[in-house]
C-alpha cells in the first residue's frame, strides 16, 4: 500500500499540472454570430406576436415582455462568453483532455488506447473562420465522450492525425 | 437435417424449424390482435351464423397462410461455412445475404423457448461485434448440430474449443439452485421493484385497452369508471389497508414469478477462462461468459438475504456501439452462497488485497448535499400536494416521510466507500441493499472529474469512470486524492497491454 502511494506521488504525470490550451477566439465570434441570428429570429417572431395579438389583450404588459426578453438574452450572451473562457483542452503523449463548465465543472480525459474512432466536422459558420470540431468516441455508452469544438482546422487535422497514428500503434 | 454435421455446403436448419417459425409468427399475430379476439368472443352471441362462417374461414385462411409462410421462410433460410466466413442466405421475397468473418464473432449462445423445448431443438444465436449490432438466430438445430456448428465456428477463431458435452459430464457445477432455494431468493427480493415492474406491465396493458376503446369512442366510460372508483376509495382507510396487503401479496407473487421465469434450474459451471450459465423456465438460456468480456461485477445483498447467507452477482459485459444497456448484457446469478461468490470473484480478479486495503469514505459534504437535495424535493412535493388537494391534512404524511428519508440518506452514506489496490477498484454503495462493485483499472474507457461550484468551495469532487458497460461513480472525494486516483487510472489504462474486451 505504502509503495503504491509513492508511485502515485512521485512518478505519475499529473493532470493538475499540465497547461491547458484555450479554445481559439474565433470560435467565440462564430458562437456570437449564431446567437445573434437566433436572437434576431426570435425577436422578429416576438415582435409580430406582440404587435398583432398581445397588444390588444394585455397592452399594459407589453413593455415588460420586451424587458424580459432583453434581460434573458443578456444573461444568455454573458453565459456564452463566460462558458467559452472555461473551455480548455490538452493533448498529451498518451491522452487527450477537455475541461469545461461554469456551474458544473468537468474534466474528461480519454487515453488514446481506448479510442474507437475520431471524427472531424465543420459546421457552416465555423467554416468561415476555418474552425472545426473533433469528436472522440470510445466503447460503450458513447453519449458521454469528448467533443472539442472550435479548433483551427489545421490544428484539428494535426490532432486527428496524431490520435489516429496512436490508435494504430 | 445434415446429420453428418458438415457445414461446407449450404444446409437448412432442422425441418422442425417450420414448427418453431409457425408458432413464433402465431404468437406475434396473437400479441397484436388479442384485444380484437377478446371483443369478438364477447360479441359472439350477437353474430349471425353467416358472419360467423366468414370469420372462421378468415381465421383458417390466416392459419394456413402462416403455415405456408413458415415453410417458405424455412426453405429459404440456408447457411454454410466457407473459408473463415459464416454465410447466411435468407428472405422469401427480399433475399438477404449475410457474411460474417469468424474473428468478428463474439459469442455463440444457445436458447430454448417453450416450443423449442417441446420438440427438442436449440436456437443458436451468433453475436457479433461491430458498430451496428448484428445478431443472427438459427431457430432450430438438433443439439448435435448446434454443438457441431458452434465448434466449427469457434475452433477456427483460435479461442479454446470448449466442448460442452464432455465438460458437463466430467465437471461438477459450481452452483445449482434448487426450486427450494429459488423460493428463498424470491421471498427476499426487492418487492417494491417487482411491484413497479408489475405496475408498468399493467399500465401498458391498460393503455392498450384504452387505445382500442378510443377507436370505439368509449374512452370516457373507462376513465370515468376509474375516477369514480378512485374517489370513493381515497377516503376509506379500511379499503386502503386492504389494498396495501393485496399489493404486497401481488408484489411477492410477481417477484416469485419473475425469479422463477428467469432463473429456474440455474446452474453455473466454471471453466478455465469462462463461466457457463444455464437458466430459465419457459426460455432456457445457456450463456458463456468469457473472462475478458466482463467489464465489472457487482455483488449485492440485502438485510434479509444476508441473514440467510445469500447474495447475487451481476456481470456487466461490454455493449457495442450506441446500443443502450441491453438486458442480455446484464447477467445475474442469484442465490449464491458466500464461498461460491468467493470462487467466482477469484476466477475473474485477484481481489484479496483490495478487500484488505485501506477504506476511504466520501467527504461528509456528500451527506449534506443529499440532505439539502431531498429537503428541497420534499418542499416542492409538499407545495404541489397542498395546492392540488387544498387540504393540510395530507401534509401529515410528512411525519412518515421525513424519518424515512433521513434513515435512507444515513444508510446510503454509511454504505458508501471505496478501496483500491494496484489493479482493482472496489466501490460500495446502496441504501437498503448493499452493492459492492469490482472494477479493474485497465478496463476504464475514459475518466471524468465533475465538480459543482458548491463542491469547489469544499474542495471535493466526483470521479466518474466510464467503462464499456456503463459508468461507475465515486462521489465527493477530497480533491487531492481524486487527482492522484485520476492520474493513476490514466497511468494504468495507458500502460496496460491486456485487451479490455
Image (cartoon, rainbow, N blue to C red):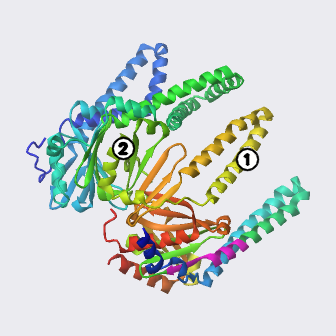
Q: Is residue B53 above or below residue B307?
A: above
Foreground: B59 or B330? B330
Chain assignment, label 1: B
Q: Residue under circle 2?
A: B338
Q: Residue furthest bottom?
A: A154
The quarter of the displayed image where residue B258 is located: top left
Instruction: Report the magenta stretch's main SS.
Output: helix
* Quadrant in which the C terminus of chain B is drawn: bottom left
> Residue A116 in the image: x percent, y percent?
39, 69
Residue B353 is tagged as none
Q: Earlier in the sequence, mark 2 or mark 1?
A: 2
Left or right relative to A118: residue B26: left
Total count of labels? 2
User: What residue is shown at x 30% (from left), y 36% (from top)?
Assistant: B113
> Residue B228 in the image: x percent, y percent?
68, 24
Left or right relative to A34: residue B97: left
Secondary structure at badge 2 equals helix
The quarter of the displayed image where residue B355 is located: bottom left
Q: Which residues are magenta?
A: A77-90
> Residue B64 in the image: x percent, y percent?
29, 29
Q: Between marks 2 and 1, how big is the CA–CA gap?
A: 43 Å
Left or right relative to A83: residue B353: left
Residue B7 is covered by the magenta coloring = no
User: Which of labels 2 and 1 is toward the front?
Assistant: 2
Residue B380 is tagged as 1
* Quadrant in which the N terminus of chain B is drawn: top left
Foreground: B371 or A57? B371
User: What residue is shown at x 87% (from left), y 61% (from top)?
Assistant: A62
The quarter of the displayed image where residue B364 is located: bottom right
The reply to whether residue B391 is in sight is no
User: What residue is shown at x 31% (from left), y 66% (from top)?
Assistant: B499
Amino acid at each position: 500500500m505504502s509503495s503504491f502511494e509513492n508511485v502515485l506521488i512521485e512518478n505519475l504525470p499529473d493532470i493538475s499540472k499540465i497547461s491547458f490550451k484555450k479554445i481559439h477566439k474565433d470560435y467565440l465570434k462564430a458562437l456570437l454570430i449564431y446567437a445573434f441570428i437566433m436572437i434576431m429570429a426570435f425577436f422578429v417572431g416576438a415582435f409580430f406576436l406582440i404587435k398583432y395579438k398581445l397588444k390588444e389583450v394585455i397592452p399594459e404588459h407589453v413593455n415588460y415582455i420586451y424587458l424580459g426578453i432583453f434581460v434573458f438574452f443578456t444573461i444568455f450572451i454573458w453565459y456564452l462568453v463566460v462558458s467559452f473562457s472555461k473551455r480548455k483542452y490538452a493533448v498529451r503523449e498518451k491522452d487527450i483532455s477537455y475541461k469545461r463548465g461554469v456551474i458544473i465543472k468537468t474534466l474528461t480525459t480519454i487515453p488514446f488506447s481506448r479510442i474507437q474512432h475520431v471524427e472531424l466536422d465543420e459546421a457552416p459558420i465555423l467554416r468561415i473562420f476555418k474552425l472545426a470540431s473533433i469528436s472522440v468516441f470510445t466503447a460503450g455508452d458513447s453519449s458521454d465522450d469528448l467533443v472539442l469544438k472550435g479548433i483551427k482546422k489545421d490544428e484539428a487535422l494535426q490532432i486527428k492525425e496524431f490520435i489516429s497514428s496512436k490508435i494504430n500503434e | 437435417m445434415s446429420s453428418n454435421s458438415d457445414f461446407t455446403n449450404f444446409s437448412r436448419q432442422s425441418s422442425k424449424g417450420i414448427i418453431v417459425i409457425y408458432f413464433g409468427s402465431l404468437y406475434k399475430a396473437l400479441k397484436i390482435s388479442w384485444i380484437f379476439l377478446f371483443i369478438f368472443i364477447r360479441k359472439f352471441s350477437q353474430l349471425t351464423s353467416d358472419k360467423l362462417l366468414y370469420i372462421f374461414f378468415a381465421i383458417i385462411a390466416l392459419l394456413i397462410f402462416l403455415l405456408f409462410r413458415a415453410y417458405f421462410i424455412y426453405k429459404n433460410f440456408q447457411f454454410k461455412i466457407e473459408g473463415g466466413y459464416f454465410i447466411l442466405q435468407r428472405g422469401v421475397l427480399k433475399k438477404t445475404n449475410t457474411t460474417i468473418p469468424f474473428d468478428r464473432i463474439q459469442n455463440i449462445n444457445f436458447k430454448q423457448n417453450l416450443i423449442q423445448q417441446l420438440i427438442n431443438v436449440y436456437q443458436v444465436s451468433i453475436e457479433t461485434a461491430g458498430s451496428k449490432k448484428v445478431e443472427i438466430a438459427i431457430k432450430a438445430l438438433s443439439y448435435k448440430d448446434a454443438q457441431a456448428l458452434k465448434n466449427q465456428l469457434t475452433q477456427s477463431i483460435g479461442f479454446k474449443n470448449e466442448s460442452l458435452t464432455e465438460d458437463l459430464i466430467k465437471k461438477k457445477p459450481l452452483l445449482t439452485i434448487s426450486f427450494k432455494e429459488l423460493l428463498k431468493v424470491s421471498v427476499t427480493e426487492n418487492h417494491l421493484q417487482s411491484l413497479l415492474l408489475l405496475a408498468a406491465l399493467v399500465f401498458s396493458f391498460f393503455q392498450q385497452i384504452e387505445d382500442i376503446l378510443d377507436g370505439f369512442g368509449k374512452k370516457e366510460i373507462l376513465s370515468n369508471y376509474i375516477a369514480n372508483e378512485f374517489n370513493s376509495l381515497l377516503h376509506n382507510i379500511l379499503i386502503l389497508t386492504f389494498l396495501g396487503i393485496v399489493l404486497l401479496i401481488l408484489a411477492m407473487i410477481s417477484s416469485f414469478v419473475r425469479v422463477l421465469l428467469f432463473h429456474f434450474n440455474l446452474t453455473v459451471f466454471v471453466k478455465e477462462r469462462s463461466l457457463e450459465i444455464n437458466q430459465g423456465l419457459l426460455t432456457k438460456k445457456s450463456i458463456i461468459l468469457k473472462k475478458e468480456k466482463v467489464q465489472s461485477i457487482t455483488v449485492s445483498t440485502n438485510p434479509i438475504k444476508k441473514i440467510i447467507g445469500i447474495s447475487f452477482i451481476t456481470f456487466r459485459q461490454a455493449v457495442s456501439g450506441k446500443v443502450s444497456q441491453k438486458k442480455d448484457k446484464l447477467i445475474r446469478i442469484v442465490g449464491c452462497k458466500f464461498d461460491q461468490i468467493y470462487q467466482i470473484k477469484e476466477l475473474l480478479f485477484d481481489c484479496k488485497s483490495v478487500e484488505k486495503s485501506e477504506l476511504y469514505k466520501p467527504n461528509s459534504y456528500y451527506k449534506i448535499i443529499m440532505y439539502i437535495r431531498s429537503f428541497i424535493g420534499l418542499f416542492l412535493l409538499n407545495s404541489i400536494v397542498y395546492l392540488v388537494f387544498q387540504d393540510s391534512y395530507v401534509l401529515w404524511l410528512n411525519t412518515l416521510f421525513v424519518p424515512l428519508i433521513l434513515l435512507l440518506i444515513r444508510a446510503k452514506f454509511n454504505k458508501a466507500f471505496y478501496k483500491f489496490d494496484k489493479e482493482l477498484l472496489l466501490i460500495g454503495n446502496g441504501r437498503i441493499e448493499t452493492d459492492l462493485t469490482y472494477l479493474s483499472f485497465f478496463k476504464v474507457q475514459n475518466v471524468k472529474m465533475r465538480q459543482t461550484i458548491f463542491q469547489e468551495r469544499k474542495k471535493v469532487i466526483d470521479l466518474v469512470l466510464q467503462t464499456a458497460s456503463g459508468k461507475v461513480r465515486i462521489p465527493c472525494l477530497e480533491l487531492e486524492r481524486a487527482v492522484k486516483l485520476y492520474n493513476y487510472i490514466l497511468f494504468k489504462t495507458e500502460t496496460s497491454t491486456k485487451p479490455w474486451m
